[in-house]
Image (cartoon, helix red, strand yellow):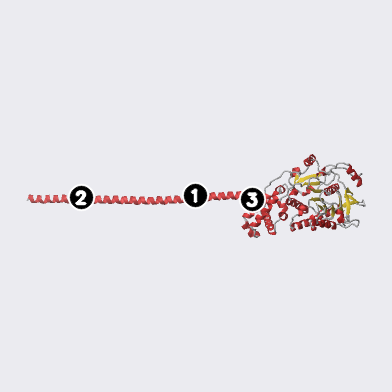
């Protein structure tokens, strides 16, 4: 419950003194831990309500579907009346709803959340996909090539298209950027399959979320509680981790430096936080640690909610200064060790042994340690956590539908948009290339046909010339033959004439001679 710049978290036991968390220290991050059913969700709701009352926007992951009651007023009961009196809040406590905006990566339980592959970038994507250093280098080259060619990688089909494009042109790009083994390109493609199966095609796309839409207040100045419906999302660790990492990186890149403000710019509650670190490579843990450490100066508070502090790497846990530890159950040596580790993370209270109390806490009780106004960790206190003012159970479906219908962001994000990007541009280029190849093929066919016709024409000309020459030779022979026949005929006539002349001449000569003789 918000009280004058601080959050009233509950009463210490046995002193019955109020335990506060200070708003000016809330961006120093925190941890809410405890076994199932010990009250973590109620503690998270109390904090979320208090931040909202202080005008601080909240982002909260609802992994079990039981936090939606924030948008409805709480239900009265005799038990609640006793708690109201116990915490001394009779004059200030009222059952009331809080301003809530529902979000969902899949778009089923709230307004869709989307980002682009380019915006997530190769570094975070490589860590989510578990790529090796060499494969990450290849992915960086793919992003570089896409950027240089104006090919936006918006969704996963764009990334697949880019991988295929680079694979087909690997020889060319390897000369420019260094060797890209086919095995590395294939490994990246295979690594995308689990992410796609987990709903990556819903998360990557447009319109992309503007995270500043989460940083707003309602008309009464209360911080909006942005509730991520994550019941389905947490079933798919890769997608859940991708979302959380992207969100932290996006906030860090877009929010201005504010140092240590009087109150946070926005507070995040990451429920089932262990999913962020399970089987995470060292490089991913280092990235989270770095982001958590630096994002504090942006006025962002991050609160990890999980069953045991051991679920969080020590390097990240060290950044969590405000701690609420609900009961832990220990039956095995490993569990006993986890209890001891959790106890040692608190500043000791001489009034009790922390290790023993952790296992004796009842539902709604916790060990708490918050930073004081000067940023000094307070000693651990056994604390009865105050009751929330909103509904402890999930809200009615009709209420949720009403809230969604009234959301000012439905028009902005509900409808997915498939703008022209790498996939479409590469498809267009491939089609143009195929069309050009077809034109070239047709040109080649026409050229071949032209050459064939030319060859046939030349052949026909040669054959015609040969035939003409043959005909001329034949004609010449015939003419020669005719001439020879004519000449022969002339010779025969001449010979005949000569013979006749001689014969006639002889006769005339004889007649002449005889005539002369007889005349004498």
Inspect this view and state whether residue 451 appears.
Answer: yes
- In contact (CB < 8 Å): disc 1 and disc 3: no
Could you say which is closer to the camera, residue 235 or residue 229?
235
Is any atom of residue 293 visible in this view? no
**Counting other residues with Cα less than 10 Å from the Cα at mark 3, is it few (<14), some (14-19), or many (20 or more)?**
some
| Pair 2/3: label in front | 3
Q: Secondary structure at mark 1?
A: helix
* Cβ–Cβ under 8 Å for marks 2 and 3: no
Q: CA distance from mark 2 to mark 3?
A: 101 Å
**Could you tell me residue 330's position as x and y percent?**
82, 54
Badge 1 crowding class, 10 Å Cα cut-off, few under 14, some 14 to 19, many 20 or more, is few
Label 1 to label 3: alpha-carbon separation: 34 Å
Q: What separation in Å lies between label 2 and label 1 (alpha carbons)? A: 68 Å
* Closest to the observer, 235 or 73: 235
Name the disc covering residue 449, or none: 1
Mark found first going from the N terminus, 2 or 1: 1
Which numbered dot is residue 496?
A: 2
Q: Secondary structure at mark 2?
A: helix
Q: Residues within 10 Å of mark 2 (few under 14, many from 20)?
A: few
Residue at (41% x, 51% y) in the render: 463
Q: Which mark is residue 426?
A: 3
């Amino acid at each position: 419950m918000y009280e004058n710049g601080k959050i009233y978290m509950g009463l210490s036991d046995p002193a019955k003194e109020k335990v506060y968390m200070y708003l000016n220290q809330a961006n120093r991050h925190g941890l809410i831990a405890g076994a199932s059913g010990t009250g973590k969700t109620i503690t998270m709701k109390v904090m979320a309500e208090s931040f909202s009352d202080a005008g601080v926007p909240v982002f909260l992951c609802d992994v079990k579907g039981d936090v939606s009651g924030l948008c409805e007023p709480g239900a009265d009961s005799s038990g609640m009346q006793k708690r109201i009196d116990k915490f001394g809040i009779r004059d200030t406590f009222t059952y009331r709803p809080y301003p809530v905006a529902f979000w969902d990566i899949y778009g089923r339980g709230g307004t869709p959340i989307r980002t682009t592959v380019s915006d997530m970038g190769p570094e975070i994507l490589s860590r989510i996909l578990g790529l090796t250093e060499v494969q990450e280098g290849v992915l960086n080259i793919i992003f570089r090539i896409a950027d240089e060619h104006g090919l936006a990688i918006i969704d996963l089909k764009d990334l697949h298209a880019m991988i295929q494009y680079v694979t087909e042109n690997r020889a060319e790009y390897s000369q420019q950027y260094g060797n890209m083994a086919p095995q590395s390109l294939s490994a990246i493609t295979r690594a995308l399959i689990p992410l796609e199966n987990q709903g990556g095609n819903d998360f990557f796309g447009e319109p992309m979320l503007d995270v500043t839409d989460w940083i707003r207040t309602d008309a009464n100045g209360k911080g909006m509680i942005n509730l991520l419906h994550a019941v389905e999302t947490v079933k798919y660790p890769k997608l859940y981790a991708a979302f959380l990492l992207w969100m932290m990186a996006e906030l860090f890149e877009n929010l201005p430096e504010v140092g240590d403000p009087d109150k946070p710019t926005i507070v995040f509650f990451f429920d089932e936080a262990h999913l962020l670190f399970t089987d995470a490579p060292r490089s991913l843990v280092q990235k989270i640690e770095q982001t958590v450490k630096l994002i504090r100066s942006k006025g962002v508070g991050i609160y990890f909610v999980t069953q045991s502090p051991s679920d969080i790497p020590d390097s990240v846990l060290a950044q969590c200064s405000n701690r609420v530890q609900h009961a832990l159950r220990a039956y095995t040596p490993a569990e006993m060790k986890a209890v001891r580790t959790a106890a040692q993370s608190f500043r000791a209270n001489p009034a009790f042994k922390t290790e023993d109390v952790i296992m004796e806490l009842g539902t709604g009780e916790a060990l708490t340690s918050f930073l004081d106004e000067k940023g000094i960790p307070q000693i651990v206190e056994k604390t009865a956590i105050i009751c929330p003012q909103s509904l402890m159970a999930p809200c009615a479906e009709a209420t949720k539908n009403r809230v969604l219908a009234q959301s000012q962001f439905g028009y902005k994000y509900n409808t997915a948009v498939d703008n022209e990007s790498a996939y479409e541009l590469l498809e267009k280029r491939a089609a143009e290339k195929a069309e050009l190849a077809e034109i070239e093929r047709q040109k080649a066919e026409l050229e071949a046909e032209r050459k064939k016709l030319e060859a046939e024409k030349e052949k026909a000309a040669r054959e015609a010339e040969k035939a003409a020459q043959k005909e001329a030779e034949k004609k010449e022979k015939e003419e020669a033959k005719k001439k020879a026949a004519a000449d022969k005929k002339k010779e025969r006539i001449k010979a005949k004439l000569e013979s006749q002349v001689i014969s006639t001449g002889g006769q005339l000569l004889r007649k002449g001679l005889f005539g002369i003789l007889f005349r004498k």
